[in-house]
Image (cartoon, helix red, strand yellow):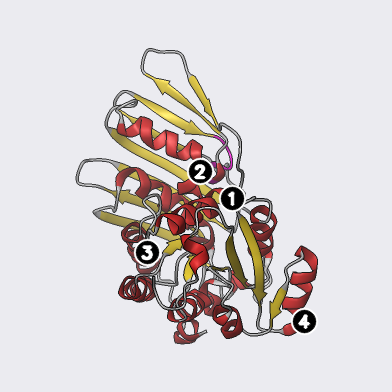
Amino acid sequence: MATGQTSQTDSRNAPVRWGVLATGGIAARFTSDVRELADAEIVAVASRSDASAKEFADRFGIPRAYGEWAALVADPEVDVVYVATPHSAHRTAAGLALAAGKAVLCEKPFTLDVREAEELVALARERGLFLMEAMWTYCNPVIRRLVELVRDGAIGEIRTVQADFGFPGPTDPRHRLRDPALGGGALLDLGVYPVSFAHLLLGEPDRVQAEALLSPEGVDLNTGMLLGWDSGATALLSCSLAAGTPVTATVSGTAGRIELPSGFFSAERFVLHRNGAEPEEFTADGGLYGLQYEAAEVMRCLRAGETESPLVPLDGTLAVMRTLDAVRDRIGVRFPAAARTS
């Protein structure tokens, strides 16, 4: 067992004890979902202010609140830290937890760029600690079933993937989505979903093209991506903070296609269209929901002594980060140096 980890992660029966690092919207949603799991406990929360941590703890009935991150990662009763900070702080927060010997689930996008991601992965592997990107889409049973069907040849050889995610975003330049220092823009917040979906089905692309509308602050507001593979497959992806889009996804092959309805990244159903056959609808079996799937996968891995999830492998996370970096390079989005030291 790595230094700093507690024996709770080795128990098949005792609840896994979570520490939540940050108190924003996604942290609240994660806490709300995970505290309903019978085999999980949220035992601590940390913020950069005592007041914020205490308010969050009171709201969700969390026993300990810390006004500094270091206190959370030093808590001996925390088995795994969920990092829910703004993108610009992922590297620092996750690195702090790993350095303290804690397992980590880090929100997407994993980091600002692949260099930061490689640093975290190297640290986790060096210390033998569990680390996973919170790409809940990959843990969703409907998406997992879709992948199984594709790999079993249900639609033949993949030729195209199409996916989008867009909504009318904030106009205030002070908002985090408009702030380059916080990793703002459509790509990292929204585009990570279509890009990750394409990667899940086709792996890392051989070619990346992109066009974007940039804000006066220098972040992308509307981005289109064309990814290409040597197999001849292509992916047409988009993300937007300038317009609402269908937020759907389709994967088409030589023998049919699969369509995911709006909200594809948290799908509850999809329709399989095989050439010459009636459409087939697949739905979730029930049980868990929302962010519970990723939490359950983390806890399964911890109890099994695994340091990486086969559903969200670290090499796959690094590949997605390389593609996001390539897109940013094509569209001219640069994050200031301060963003990497937040």
**Numbered circle sitting on residue 162:** none
Badge 1 marks a residue whose secondary structure is helix
**Sooner in the amino-acid sequence: mark 3 or mark 1:** 1
* Residue at the spot of label 2: 140
Q: Main secondary structure of the magenta part?
A: loop
**Sooner in the amino-acid sequence: mark 2 or mark 3:** 2
Residue 85 shown left or right of residue 172 in the figure: left
**Amino acid on which the number 2 mark rests in the picture:** Asn
Residue 182 shown left or right of residue 64 in the figure: left
* Residue at the spot of label 4: 51
List x then y, in percent, for residue 255.
Answer: 31, 23
How far is disc 2 from disc 3 in space, using C-alphas? Answer: 21 Å
Asked if the stretch drawn in magenta spans residue 35, the answer is no
How far is disc 3 from disc 1 in space, using C-alphas? Answer: 24 Å
* Residue at the spot of label 1: 292
Q: From which residue to which does the magenta span run?
A: 261-265
**Sooner in the amino-acid sequence: mark 4 or mark 1:** 4
Disc 4 versus disc 3: nearer the observer: 4
How far is disc 2 from disc 1 in space, using C-alphas? Answer: 9 Å
List x then y, in percent, for residue 323.
Answer: 34, 60
Kindly tell me whether residue 89 is visible in this rendering: yes
List x then y, in percent, for residue 208.
Answer: 30, 56
**Amino acid on which the number 1 mark rests in the picture:** Gln
